[in-house]
Image (spheres, rainbow, N blue to C red):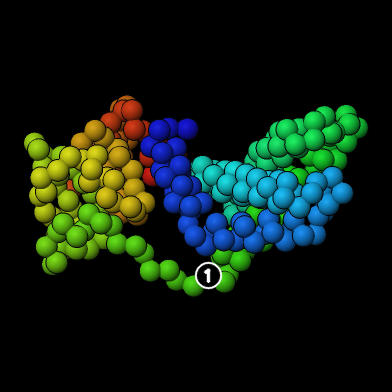
């Protein structure tokens, strides 16, 4: 897993799991499980510890599942969607199973007989796959179009050049910001410009960042590559970033 993809996934994970809606939903699910007391937790734990237990279980498994999806989906662009859903579900289930085992071990001490390991693993992984399928199906069929959040970087541009981002390129102490409506030079560091982007993209060179949806094609040139953009000139890809564009599905 390259640093760019990992950092992007972690950034999106932090943004998602700290959103008020996500936090409220997790608290609501934990509250319901606390009142119901499934899997014998009503008999084993008093109300306060039981609430804490389910808050930890629900939060840990949800966050693990979401991060697994963020890390895996970019690698599964060429895989049929149903197969991708299964892979993400199994991966999330394995990670959730380990988390649940450790949490239960801390809460109850040794609690799982050797004969129960396989049924326990199958149950957790099965639930994770089913939940992943349900969530992905609902997202694909019920979610309406969402207005994209405009990158903060665009607020630095003249109004007539505030279009979808294409690329960022370093020139001396400036960053050339290319959008579908033109270009503008900004006095700032590339790292700061990328931080303000907030949209799908990759740094493909120490001096260049591209929006992946604006890449028309990728051409391999020895141990490097060149990206042909839908607007403006080509962008070079350095050797150390070749794996990143491969993972993004830009280069076979």
Question: Which of 227/156 is in front?
Answer: 156
Question: Which of 249/161 is in front?
Answer: 161
Where residue 102 sits, quadrant-wise, is top right
Q: Residue at x 75, y 49 (%)?
A: 50
SS of the residue under disc 1: loop
Question: Which of 40/176 is in front?
Answer: 40
Where residue 113 sits, quadrant-wise, is top right
**Quadrant of the image containing the C terminus:** top left
Where residue 112 sits, quadrant-wise, is top right
Q: Residue at x 18, y 53 (%)?
A: 178
Q: In the rendering, at what x and y percent does residue 54 appear?
A: 70, 49
- The answer, for residue 252, to whether it is visible in the render is no
Q: In the displayed structure, would residue 84 be above or below residue 119?
A: below
Q: In the rendering, at what x and y percent does residue 7 appear?
A: 41, 39
Q: Say left or right for 52 vs 126.
A: left
Disc 1 packing (10 Å; few <14; some 14–19; many ≥20): few
- The answer, for residue 142, to whether it is visible in the render is yes
Q: In the rendering, at what x and y percent does residue 28 appear?
A: 64, 61
Q: In the rendering, at what x and y percent does residue 225 appear?
A: 29, 35
Q: Which residue is label 1 attached to?
A: 143
Q: Residue at x 49, y 72 (%)?
A: 144
């Amino acid at each position: 897993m390259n640093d760019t993809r990992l950092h992007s996934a972690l950034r999106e994970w932090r943004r998602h799991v700290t959103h008020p809606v996500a936090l409220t939903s997790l608290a609501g699910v934990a509250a319901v499980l606390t009142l119901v007391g499934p899997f014998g937790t009503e008999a084993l734990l008093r109300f306060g510890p039981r609430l804490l237990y389910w808050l930890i279980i629900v939060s840990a498994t949800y966050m693990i599942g979401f991060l697994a999806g963020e890390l895996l989906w970019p690698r599964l662009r060429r895989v049929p969607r149903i197969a991708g859903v299964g892979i993400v579900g199994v991966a999330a289930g394995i990670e959730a199973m380990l988390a649940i085992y450790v949490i239960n071990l801390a809460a109850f001490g040794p609690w799982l007989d050797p004969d129960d390991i396989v049924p326990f693993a199958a149950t957790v992984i099965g639930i994770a796959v089913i939940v992943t399928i349900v969530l992905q199906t609902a997202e694909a069929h019920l979610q309406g179009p969402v207005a994209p959040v405009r990158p903060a970087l665009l607020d630095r541009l003249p109004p007539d050049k505030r279009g979808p981002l294409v690329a960022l390129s370093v020139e001396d102490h400036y960053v050339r910001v290319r959008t579908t409506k033109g270009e503008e030079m900004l006095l700032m560091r590339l790292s700061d410009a990328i931080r303000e982007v907030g949209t799908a993209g990759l740094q493909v060179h120490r001096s260049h960042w591209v929006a992946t949806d604006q890449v028309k094609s990728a051409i391999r040139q020895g141990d490097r590559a060149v990206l042909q953009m839908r607007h403006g000139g080509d962008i070079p890809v350095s050797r150390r970033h070749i794996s990143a564009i491969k993972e993004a599905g830009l280069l076979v």
